[in-house]
Image (cartoon, rainbow, N blue to C red):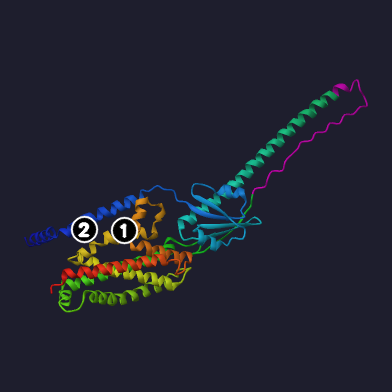
Amino acid sequence: MRTIAIVKRVLREMLRDKRTLALMFIAPLFILSLMYFLFQNNSTSVAKIGVSNVDTSLVKALKNKHTDLASYGTHANAKTTIRQHNLAAFIHEEDGKLTVTYSNSQPSDTALVKQALQGGVTKLKVQALVAATKTQKRVLQQQAKVLKTVMAQQQKLQAAQGTTRGQTATVGATGSTTKPKAAPNYTVTSHYLYGNSDSTFFDTFLPVLLGFFVFFFVFLISGISLLNERTTGTLTRLLATPVRRGEIITGYLVGYGIFAVIQTIITVTFALTVFNVHMLGSVWVILLINFLLAMVALSMGIFISTFANSEFQMVQFIPLLIVPQVFFSGIITIATMPDWLQWLAHIFPLYYGGDALMNVATRGFSLGDVSGDLWILVLFAGVFTVLNVVGLKRYRRV
């Protein structure tokens, strides 16, 4: 009976909390629907390849539905060209030697280029073998025809020996033969701008995961901390003083922001030293991007906490606000998504943070190159800060 009484109490509390019930039942459906649209897309991945001084037959053999080839000058620099035109790889040929430089910022694109290159070289060898076989067949046919002619002439000579003696007949046969084109024997040398041939999925997307974890934990801790301030009455007593709402929000942002900066430095340093992550760009820019993500998460967490009445409700906002951002942060290629999902990605801060982190870490972009993404993150933080100041008005009683 005691157990039944506890069950009844839990059921009554849950039924009274409509918001918790809604989040509990709607959030899983939302995430499942989003994943359905993300993973049902059947678009073909295409890797952009730059070629320089490459034989036209090889270029033709490399073309397929998964590759998009563009030709560049003989003296084009691989690293610069890859960065300027966002190429998956750059191929240069010199004296039968192929130098392939992979961007390696997307493992799937690197795999497509390797498959195309291997398939193209194999295709040329097969074509050369087929051509050689056809040439040999023509030579054998010519030799058979010549042999048949010689046999016929010999029979005529033997028949004429009785009437014409002392005469000799010489039969010459020439067959024009064409030397078949030798199969290409390319020597391939590979270079990687980011990582190496043994790079894993974790190595490639660690910059994005770094930004996500900074964003997630700052959002969660800041939201729950301010929620605790409100539920315990601390915020209400603070609002009863002459302190302005803007000063309160600024104080919370700076206070929690100090710990967010420390967390960012520890997380980035740990990833660079323990996992030995290869960064093409500046580490300071990586730190700056993560710091801005932490500021957005901090202001966003404080704002969302105003809609929660308990820590349980705060946690339930994670599937609605945080999990979708993982899909749009760059772990899944945005360009392969349906158009409406690509537009949807632009409303999430981690879309811009992930894009900036990947460009700096895997493509060597400078601070100026990613300034557009950074200003948008600053705008997100500013908007949520203003909303926090406005939202505090509902709790001020004096």
Screen quadrant of the N terminus: bottom left
Query: How far, Cα to Cα, is label 2 from label 1?
Result: 15 Å
Q: Which residues are magenta?
A: 158-183
Q: Residue at x 23, y 70 (%)?
A: 389
C-beta proximity under 8 Å, tags 2 and 1 = no
Vertical placement of residue 207 versus 44, above or below:
below
The answer to if 175 sits in the magenta stretch is yes
Task: Point out which mark residue 23 bears.
Answer: 2
**Residue 306 occupies quadrant:** bottom left
Badge 2 marks a residue whose secondary structure is: helix
Q: Percent x, y for residue 394?
A: 16, 68
Vertical placement of residue 56 versus 166, above or below:
below
- Which is more toward the observer, 351 or 31? 351
Q: Is residue 60 visible?
A: yes
Disc 1: which residue: 324
Q: Is residue 220 visible?
A: no
- Which is more toward the observer, 131 or 290? 290
Q: Residue at x 87, y 29 (%)?
A: 169
